[in-house]
Amino acid sequence: METQTTLNVHPDNAVVWHRDQLHLLDQRYLPGRAEFLALESAAATAAAIRDMVVRGAPAIGIAAAYGVVLAARARFAEQGADWRVAIEADLAQLAASRPTAVNLFWALARMRERFATLGGGDPVPELLAAAQAIHDEDRAGNRRMGELGAGLIDEPTEVVTHCNAGALATGGYGTALGVIRSAHAAGRIHHVYADETRPWLQGTRLTAWELAESGIPVTVQADHAAASLLATGRIGWVIVGSDRIAANGDVANKIGTYGLAVLARHHGVRVMVAAPTSTIDLALASGAEIPIEERDAAEVLACGGVQVGPAGVGARNPVFDVTPAGLVDAIVTERGVVMAPDTDKIAALMRGG
Ligand code: MRU
């Protein structure tokens, strides 16, 4: 991986195809250090997803789609017409990078479907167009979700968000933060509380940076400060994204979302989940079947790279949890809104009914 800084540093520009390379705004060091990594192979793309250079469900899928383009270029150069066989190892490597966000597998499946339609020549132009279409559709879908989600907020209010479901986590604009951006522009949200989101601090580092760049008033709070804030009655909505939504409307999202949704229900605060339909996994009947990634204990036992826990003590580090559909007031997708989600309503949304 090569580091370079000539591209425009902006949250809406986190995944960029430029001069035949995939450039990722390195999210491990934001906002302190803003630099792009230039990737030239599927292996480097898989490593970047695993190591969280790029993160957030839709952005992971988009990066993987470009990773398939890089793989096809290498395999076609090495093997000619046999590239379709050779590329399977690259697809497997990309698929093994992170387990929870279904957008990764959705994007790989969509790129694979494209293979079948290609002739015997160089696959790169067609596959690049397919990856760019995934990227463009995601951006457009986020704008649509922004409008739909903002439309649910009936009176000006303050909101809480958890993790980062913004431009950085998507093809641009954001899902939960897209709703917040649209609602702020329409005068319906005047302040955002961003949970810090231990242990990786997506809220403190990424959401706070994104909202500040967009001129939206934001205050960071420790995750466990949400309860007393919700108790004040000032918060109209909790607005979050998702990594995978099961057929019954159960929602996997960053660890802590479930607790926040329980608190919200206790205090009569509504919960909105904004996610594209590429996040909905009809193959899983309920959230109990969603694979939950466990990351290194060191993420929990250290702070800012400094070990704070005693030597020899382990840590649990499940990085997602599942919020039961019953705690979700609205799922906002680019195809429409599902209120009080359940299996029938999600199926109708996916059928286009
Ligand atoms: O571990 P991360 O940072 O990839 O987790 C991201 C989240 O949980 C987001 O809320 C989710 O992917 C939605 S992003 C639009």
Image (spheres, grey):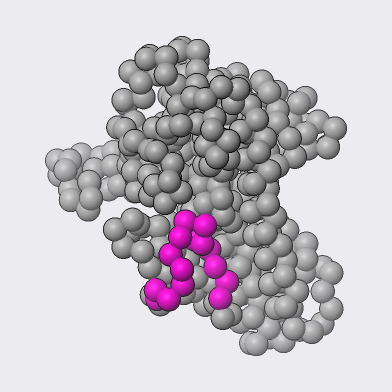
Front one among 31 and 186: 186
Asked if residue 25 is positioned above or below residue 80 in the image, the reply reads above
Q: Quadrant of residue 230?
A: top left
Residue shown at the point (50%, 70%) measured from the top left: 23
Q: Answer with left or right where residue 63 lies relative to residue 128.
A: left
Is residue 289 at all visible to an observer of this figure?
no
Residue 182's spot in the image, x, y percent?
58, 40
Residue 315's spot in the image, x, y percent?
28, 38
Residue shown at the point (45%, 60%) measured from the top left: 10
Residue 297's spot in the image, x, y percent?
30, 45
Front one among 28 and 317: 28
Q: Answer with left or right where residue 89 lies relative to residue 314.
A: right
Number of labels in the image equals 0
Does the magenta segment cover residue 182? no
Asked if residue 241 is positioned above or below residue 270 in the image, the reply reads below
Does the magenta segment cover residue 5? yes
Residue 102's spot in the image, x, y percent?
61, 47
Residue shown at the point (78%, 34%) measured from the top left: 349
Q: Quadrant of residue 1?
A: bottom left
| The C terminus lies in quadrant | top right
Region rendered in magenta = 4-18
Front one among 200 and 239: 239
Asked if residue 31 is positioned above or below residue 302 in the image, the reply reads below
Residue shown at the point (24%, 43%) measured from the top left: 301
Is residue 330 at all visible to an observer of this figure?
yes
Front one among 175 and 301: 175
